[in-house]
Amino acid sequence: MVLGFNIENVYRNLLVTLGFLLPLTVFGANLIVVIICLLWLFSGDYKSKFLEIIESKLMLASILFFLLHLVGLFWTSDLVWGFHIVHKMWYFLLLFPILFTIVRKDDIKYYVIAFLAAMLFSQIMSYSVWFEFLPPFQSATVDNPTPFMSHISYNPILAFSIYLVLHQLFFNTNLTKPIFFIGSFFAMVMIFNMFITGGRAGQVMFFAMLVILSFQYFGYKKLHILLLSFLLVPGVFFSAYQLSDKFNNRVDEGVSDLMLMSVSRNTSIGQRFSFAINSWDMIQGNLLFGVGTGDFPMEYKRINELNLRNMPFSPNTGNPHNMYILVLAQLGFIGLASLITIFYYQIKLSFNSQNKFIRDVGITLPLLMLLIMLSDSYLLGHFTTLMYVFFSSFLYKNFEKLP
């Protein structure tokens, strides 16, 4: 008991609320995050909290990743941008360890249900805009109905949500028939929504998720069945390509961008290619420690101006749209190794879990994040980072060791 109330009940309510607000609102989710952090900081029992954090290699890896960004300020010329990046990374120092110490095993189902309830609401709003029952609002348009965030974040979160629903449909034998049919309808609604919105990274994540789910469902020994299941992926791709003008156009744009790269890089994929080439020039001169937490935009501009004669129309950027390249440029191989270590411990801890849901989701989340970080710096984005941290806080906690 703290201040006359049961703090565990307060944490439970706050975490469920956070799960619901996470995909809907930046302000609302951040407000709950601030309340959780302040309550945790002033709730005492600091020794127990500290021991729980330092006994987790995952928490130590997360904190080290943040601290390297602080250390990288020492050889940074642009401290303003440096502190901007540090601010983006604070979840790995504070929020991740805090959530890790307060999540409870019995409440996991409520965290997931709250998150999926928010995604159901998001689907209703998305289709309401798409069918023009509602006028476009916030980031949603009739052509790209992603109501509460840009398609860059929306589709990866949607792909992960589809995985959570499909996993329950495939593996939860306790589902009643009405719940199974409602869940199946919800999954189909979300899958169709995936292809009327424009996030290509999320769509790639969706197809990768189908492959992972096939392995989890059929296992590794039934290879003949597993190979047949892979026909599902091109089947879904072909169906979506034929039925969805949005998906059709996005695929055609991607193919066109690739074919035109030798002529012009003034396209989405072409610019990413230019970002990678220029960033590699930066990385080669700073392999071990990088250019510093805040110097990427300045160094990129300098290199880009030197290379413009070879790559005309290449814009300057503070984000190479690749998390690995960004970390490697800022913090060198030490920083990149620190980032990969976080995902290594997540996968390792998942294999040790006796709970199938925790094990499967715990393996899938880092694999999907590792994939989409090739196309953008998703640990800089509010929605994707908060989703990653929120789910990681309870997927990798060893509840079996707790009294």
Image: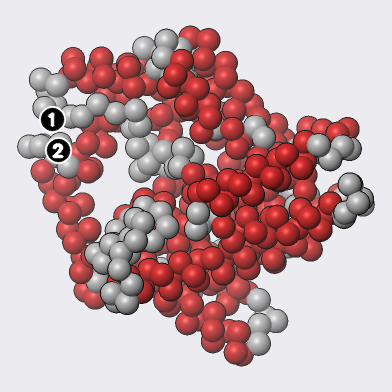
Which residue is the site of mark 1?
A: 313
Instruction: Give residue 281's quadrant in the image.
Output: top left
Position of 337 relative to 239 (above/below): above
Q: Which residue lies furthest to the bottom in this view?
A: 177
Can you tell which mark lies on residue 266?
Answer: 2
Which amino acid is tagged 1? Phe
Q: Is residue 366 visible?
A: no
**Label 1 Cα crowd, 10 Å radius (few <14 / some 14-19 / many 20+):** some
The percent coordinates of residue 371 (x first, y second) are 43, 47
Position of 353 relative to 347 (above/below): below
Specify whether 398 is left or right of 215: right
- Which residue is pictured at 14% across the width and 38% down the height? 266
**Label 2 Cα crowd, 10 Å radius (few <14 / some 14-19 / many 20+):** some
Which amino acid is tagged 2? Asn
- Which residue is pictured at 54% across the width and 65% down the height? 118
Q: Residue furthest left?
A: 263
The percent coordinates of residue 268 (x first, y second) are 22, 43
Q: Is mark 1 on a helix, strand or loop?
A: loop
Q: Residues under labels 2 and 1: Cα distance?
A: 6 Å
Position of 298 relative to 84 (above/below): above
Specify whether 183 is left or right of 61: left
The percent coordinates of residue 338 (x first, y second) are 57, 29
Q: Can residue 321 be seen in this view?
A: yes
The percent coordinates of residue 245 (x first, y second) are 20, 69
Q: Is mark 2 on a helix, strand or loop?
A: loop
Residue nearest the viewer, comparing 193 with 12:
12
Tag 2 near tag 1, CB within 8 Å: yes
Task: Return the disc, 2 or 1, that comes first in the chain's sequence.
Answer: 2
